[in-house]
Image (tube, rainbow, N blue to C red):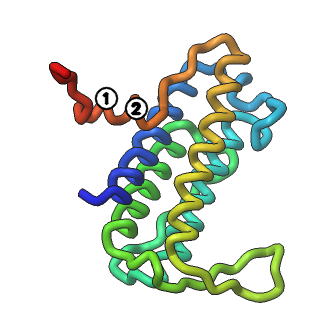
Amino acid sequence: MSTLERLFEFNRWANIEMVKACRQLSPEQLDQAVPGLYGSVRATLVHIAAAESRYVSVLASAAPTVKPVATVAEDATLDEISAALAASGSALLELARTLDGEQRVLRRSARLPQPQSLPAWVILGQAIAHGCDHRSQLATALTLFGFTPPELDLWAYAEEEGVITLTEN
């Protein structure tokens, strides 16, 4: 497995683990606005899922074997959010396997009058950075609500995968 594939395995794992951690929250806490988040915990999770869906759509135009994935509604349940993140995570992993990072794709943005042409690696990198950024914010929100957030860094993922071993020296 390539380094890029491993990073997308990590991203999918971390997203799902964060949703699991958010299951500790009450419905009121899930929907309470928290400074520093994309609104509430639920809104931030939906935002991550929606962004990943958009990344897949942009990249799938250059890899026709990968189909775009559906996004979730703003009031999605944690089960729906988890399923959406699993689907987008799997699609991004497949794109990481098949795309040439230098291949150019077209990105449309509501903020810009014309589409942008950019290399696929920019979108792939943004997917990883975006997820890490918002998961960090969600970890802070969990702490503010009195819960211990999960360890979601690459060390924790590598330990869970069993790829870190102790040596004699």
Residue located farthest toward the left when viewing the structure as drawn:
168
Q: Nearer the viewer, residue 28 or 88?
A: 88
- The residue depicted at 83 percent of the width and 32 percent of the height is 35
- At horizontal 81% and vertical 79% (from top left) the residue drawn is 112
Q: Which mark is residue 45?
A: none
Q: In which quarter of the view is residue 139 placed? A: top right
User: What is the x, y in percent for residue 145?
Assistant: 70, 16
Residue 163 left/right relative to 22: left
Q: Mark 1: which amino acid? A: Glu
Give the secondary structure at mark 1.
helix
| Mark 1 Cα shell of 10 Å, populated few (<14), some (14-19), many (≥20) | few
The disc label shown at residue 159, or none:
1
Instruction: Look at the picture and state if 5 lies above or below 46.
Output: below
Q: The N terminus is located in which quarter?
A: bottom left
Using the rendered view, name the quadrant where residue 76 is placed: top right
Q: Nearer the viewer, residue 66 or 112?
A: 112
Q: For the point 80% across and 35% down, which residue is it?
A: 36
Is 139 positioned to the left or the right of 85 in the image? right
**Would residue 126 appear left or right of 83 to someone viewing this image?**
right
Residue 123 on image: x %, y %: 56, 68
x, y percent for residue 147: 61, 14
- For the point 38% across and 83% down, the residue is 64
Seen in the picture, residue 64 relative to 55 is either above or below; the reply is: below
Tag 2 secondary structure = helix
Q: Which residue is mark 2?
A: 155
Residues at marks 1 and 2, CA–CA distance in whole angstroms = 6 Å
